Each structure stands twice: as C-alpha cells, then as structure tokens.
Amino acid sequence: MSEPALHQDGNATTCRDHAFWRARGGVGLVWSNRNASDSVMIANALLEPDFHLLLDIAEKFGLSQLKLEWDVLRNGIEENGFPEELRKLRRATPTVERCIENMEAALR
C-alpha cells in the first residue's frame, strides 16, 4: 500500500509500535488486524483525522513521513476510485490538510 513508516531515528518499520498506538486508543483504528504496520495505522488515522493524534504521529515518525503517507494514501485512493474510499478521502481532506498546514506553520 505505502512505503513503510520511518521512526525518528530514520529506520523503516513494517511492524507496529504497539505501545505508541495503544496509548492513543489505536486498537480501534485497525481492529481486524492486530499486526497491522505503522503505515497502515497512519493511513487509518489520516482517514479519521484528529489533530492531536496526527500531531503525535508527526512527532513520532516525522512530519515529512506523515505528509508522505498522506500523499501515498490520497493517490492510491484516487487511482482505485472505489466510491466508499473516495467519500472517506473527501471527508478527511480538508481536516488533514489544515492539520498539516498548522504543523508546518508552527515549525517556521
């Protein structure tokens, strides 16, 4: 689906940081796959955006990784064209983009 998420130390992860997601109520994000990778968790968080969760993700994995995950997710959904996914994307887009813009502004 997407490139593996990178932790702040620059190491890619195809596994999941269970403690990070559990501390943020992440079990419900991907309830059907307890072994979903960080990238899958981030993608799901982006489709149900919450500023504080996205901020925590940006702090843990880096803002550039959050933006990359958003671009990969958005492009993948647009390419697939599945109506349900497109609806979720349209609903999430303004919030995600506003969150990312606010994070970028805070770094200036």
Image (tube, helix red, strand yellow):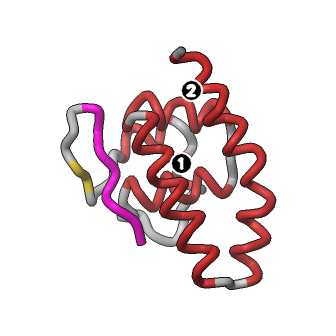
Q: Residues within 10 Å of mark 2 (few under 14, many from 20)?
A: few
Residue 20 falls left or right of residue 4: right
Number of on-image labels: 2
- Say if 77 sits above or below 90 in the image: below
Q: Nearer the viewer, mark 2 or mark 1?
A: 2
Find numbered disc 2 in the image and state the secondary structure of the residue it sits on: helix
Q: Residue at x 47, y 34 (%)?
A: 58
User: Which segment did they paint magenta?
Assistant: 1-8
Find numbered disc 1 in the image and state the secondary structure of the residue it sits on: helix
Which amino acid type corresponds to the residue marked 1 in the rendered image? Gly
Instruction: Identify the mark at residue 56; answer none if there is no mark.
Output: none
Q: Earlier in the sequence, mark 2 or mark 1?
A: 1
Given residues 27 and 60, the one toward you in this image is 60
Q: Residue at x 45, y 51 (%)?
A: 68
Residue 42 in percent (x, y) is at 49, 52
What is the quadrant of residue 77 in the picture?
A: bottom right
Q: Residues within 10 Å of mark 1 (few under 14, many from 20)?
A: some
Residue 38 falls left or right of residue 102: left
Residue 2 in percent (x, y) is at 40, 65
Q: Which residue carries the number 1 mark?
A: 26
Quarter of the image that includes the C terminus: top right
Magenta residues, dominant SS class: loop
**Mark 2–mark 1 CB contact (< 8 Å):** no
Given residues 98 and 28, the one toward you in this image is 98
Q: Residue at x 54, y 54 (%)?
A: 70
Q: CA distance from mark 2 to mark 1?
A: 24 Å
Please check the rendered image and state whether residue 58 is part of the magenta-colored stretch, yes or no. no
Q: Which residue carries the number 2 mark?
A: 104
Please check the rendered image and state whether residue 2 is part of the magenta-colored stretch, yes or no. yes
Residue 57 falls left or right of residue 88: left
Q: Residue at x 50, y 45 (%)?
A: 67
